[in-house]
Image: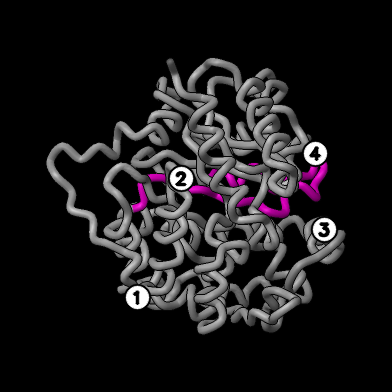
Amino acid sequence: MSPHIKGNKKSPGHPLPDSPFMKACRMEPAPFTPVWLMRQAGRYMKEYREMRAKHPFAEMCRRPELATEAAVVAARKLQVDAAILFSDLLVVCAPMGFPVRYLEGRGPVITRPLQKPSEVSRVRTHPQKGEFDYIYKAVRMTRAGLPGNIPLIGFAGAPFTLASYLIEGGGSRNYVRTKAFMYADPGAWDELMKKITSVVAPFLRGQAAAGAQVLQVFDSWAGCLSPDDYRRFVLPHTARLIRALGNSVPVIHFGTGSAHLIELLEEAGGDVIGVDWKLRLDGARKRLGRVAVQGNLDPVALFAPRREMRGFAREVLQQAGHQPGHIFNLGHGILPRTPEDNVRALIDAVHELSAKR
């Protein structure tokens, strides 16, 4: 294990359930607004770049000691209020029969994507025994390496986002193949979504059993859908997934570019709804019921001069209002060339500006 990482000895008075982050998830008052950032272990950080110079991304995901170091070093260095497992949305694809290659400058590429609805039968729903053990080991090791009051977030991709990867074969601009598949054969689409859900649900429950205190469902591509398409083709399946997770840990439900879908994301489920930067938090709270919110600073704001960035953070906090249940985050992940000092300055500003006096 890296010298950066120290073991965490839990005492009977372990403070984790009463951490500000867990309180916010439960809509309880907290002494300050907790903050963590999507992609907080990423290329903007010196230590991460040093790791990537030695190890390809896929290797870092597959080796629990490397995944642990990436997650724990970022959490300790930034002094955030939650850590997230270092992994990737697509780790479930190979066990379903779709190996993934990570190409520099291009991103993930699915081997032999689904070409037509009749190929849904290719999707395997029973991963081999122990196929996710390296993930669960990374959860246990990361949990042990974190301070006792810092929760660990486990995660997975939502059914729609994973289905889109299996059909598109990688990233997409307009999701033409996915939507054409969806419209051409709704029955095959439902079967595909059910198969994915049957794999992702136990995968997420396994992360919670291994020591994750919170689970986040990433619907990274849901923003490409109209509200009608989301309600018809996606909502029932995401709702089934979130129901299958039970009530043992809080669930964060996040969709990129989802301002027009925010009520539907809440309907699909989740204790915390992630809000991207294209919707003001006060507007989101008016449209949502009694549910916690996460967000929602524009990631590009981290490139602004320090004084401006502090003002942006203050505005987000003001929009969140004085009611409990706000987790400060970006509206999406930290961008690769973000100044590292600005990231730490943002976290310090959120803690300072939101502290209850």
> Mark 1 falls on what kind of element?
loop
10 Å crowding of disc 1: few (<14), some (14-19), many (20+): few
Quadrant location of the C terminus in the rendered image: top left
**Helix or strand or loop: what does disc 2 sit on?**
loop
Q: Quadrant of residue 178?
A: bottom right
Q: Are marks 1 and 3 in contact (CB under 8 Å)?
A: no
What separation in Å lies between label 1 and label 3 (alpha carbons)?
34 Å
**Tag of residue 179:** 3
Tell me which amino acid carries mark 3. Answer: Lys
Residue 64: image x %, image y %?
Answer: 38, 73
User: Within 10 Å of the Cα at label 3, are there few (<14), some (14-19), or many (20+) other Cα atoms?
Assistant: some
User: Which residues make up the magenta segment?
Assistant: 212-240
- State yes or no: discs 3 and 4 in contact (Cβ < 8 Å): no
Residue type for callout 1: Gly
Residue, disc 2: 80
Q: Position of residue 143 (x, y in %)?
A: 31, 56
* Alpha carbon separation for disc pair 2 and 1: 32 Å
Q: Which residue is depicted at the point 67% across and 40% down? A: 306
The local crowd at label 2, few if under 14, some if 14 to 19, many if 20 or more residues have their Cα within 10 Å, is many
Q: Between disc 4 and disc 2, whose residue precedes?
A: 2
Q: Residue at x 74, y 44 (%)?
A: 304
Nearer the observer: mark 1 or 3; the answer is 1
Question: Which one is earlier in the sequence, the residue at label 1 or at label 3?
Answer: 1
Instruction: Using the numbered discs, state the Cα–Cα distance from disc 4 to disc 1 in whole angstroms.
Output: 39 Å
Closer to the chain start, of discs 2 and 1, is 2
> At 14% from the left edge and 44% from the top edge, which residue is drawn?
11
**Within the magenta stretch, is there residue 218?**
yes
Is 327 situated above or below 176? above
Residue 130 position within the rendered picture, expressed as x and y whole percent measured from the top left: 35, 75
**For residue 97, which quarter of the picture?**
bottom right
Q: Which tag, 4 or 1, sits closer to the chain's start? A: 1
